[in-house]
Image: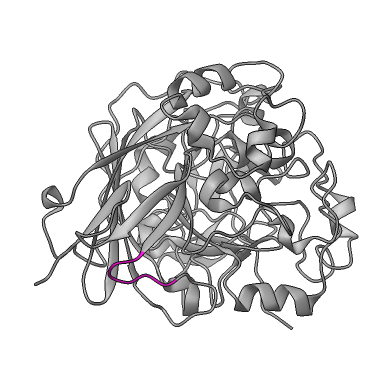
Amino acid sequence: MQRFRQRAGVFMVIVVVVTLAFAASPPGGALRPADAQAPPTIRAAGLFSFPGDWSKSPEAIVTVFSPGQISWQFLTSASHQGSKEVLSGVACQTCHQGQEKALGEKLVKAGRLEPNPVIGKRGSVDVSVRAAFDDQYLYLRFEWRAPRPGASHLLWRFDGTRWVEWGGEKPEATKEKIPPSYEDRLALMLTERNVPAADGAQTGFNQAGCFIACHTSMENMPANVAGDRVRTHPYFGGVLRASDMRHYLLITRTVADETGGWDKVKTPIELDRLRAEGSFLDLWQWRAYRSSPIGYAGDDYVLEYRLSDGGRSPFTTPARPSFMYDQARMGFRATPEARFNELLPQLPLVMDRNAVPLDPAVRFAAGDILPRNILRTPDGSSADIMANGSWEGGRWVVELRRKLTTGNPEDKPFGSGRVVRFSLALFDDHVGNRYHQVSFVQTLGLGEKTTATVRAVRVGR
């Protein structure tokens, strides 16, 4: 049986100084104004150093925009004015080049394609992208404006009697009058081949980018099938242990209907064939809380589901509070809610560092906080991508490093003279899943003779 592991959430921050617009809240959950102090600097983990000068790599500005509930099913339906062009293989940019900001401002607001808006969310963000490579590695650098960094994730809170789930993402957390606690994230879907949107389709990733992997049956989409429908499915619930639908490709389905044929998955033999021929999308996920503090980015891929690469991921999420702080090392067993911002730099629970099994005999106070996610050093293919993420003066700077060729079947290869295509997604302001901002498909070329949106220059010679 193939090894698949879903990535859920993990609460992590290492020796980084982070902040959160999480203000102490009374047991009733009433919100108080966020800490007015300027956020402290967040330091990169520093597991690697870039061996060149980033100023010598050409800068490309990629605008990501709010897509609302746009899916592949919407783009190819009569509701989309350009559906015929999409189906005939016309690229999104042919009609919408330069319209990203206008589209984002329209789609981020309440309307037909956004029934549940995040109040105050930006419609678009400009991301600076630079790239470089040497004989071993590809390096990518991203920079964007973030007035306050989302460098926290899910929490447990002791209410005086028991531990309850706390924090969470917008807009649900704010509607429940709980301070939102959800990390910023940057993700790339990329491929060296034009993976088709569906069997026999004239359109593929080269034309429509990440939209070919986005379907109406996914979480927070119009035909969301999360819950028992997924859990009782023989493959998604029985094999993958999934409880919701995430990104997938229609080439893995026997039927493409208005829900994306979510439950009509092809046989394992057919899925193995698609994987072996490279008909999948590589997915890199830098997480400000669940991976960056220990110096890594998540390494996933998209085929019949959003799947994790082999090996151990950078985080784990126990179903109940299972770890507390080592008091001898930290000086406390849990973070008092009133001191959450003050103690945030010490918040991460990391295996083999400051985390010890939760002692049921320990008495906790009402308002004590523990992370729901536990950090750990990844291994195997899940440890392919190292990351340096830093925040200062209202801007994130993220560096990624991966071997040009990892030798792992879930990873796309890179090489001098090659051009690959990617879509960029950004999660900010404490949001998750479809509340991200996305880019149209971009090109990444390795070498001075390549023509691409982002051109990687050679370093180290």
Relative vertical location of residue 449 with respect to residue 208 in this rendering, above or below: below
Whole-percent x, y for residue 275 in the image:
63, 74
Q: Residue furthest front?
A: 88
Residue at image location 66% in from the left, 78% down from the top? 3
Q: Is residue 29 above or below residue 434?
A: above
Q: Is residue 184 above or below residue 7?
A: above
Residue 402 x %, y %: 35, 68
Q: Quadrant of the C terminus?
A: bottom left
Examine the residues drawn in magenta and state their main secondary structure.
loop
What kind of colouring is applied to the model shown? one colour
Q: Residue 54: where, in percent of width, then height?
A: 15, 52
Quarter of the figure with residue 174: top right
Q: Is residue 103 visible?
A: yes
- Between residues 163 and 421, which one lies in front from this camera angle? 421
Q: Is residue 81 left or right of residue 407?
A: right
**Is residue 227 one of those drawn in magenta?**
no
Residue positioned 52% across, 22% down in the render: 103
| Magenta stretch, residue numbers | 413-418
Question: How many numbered tags mark residues here?
Answer: 0
Q: Quadrant of the N terminus?
A: bottom right
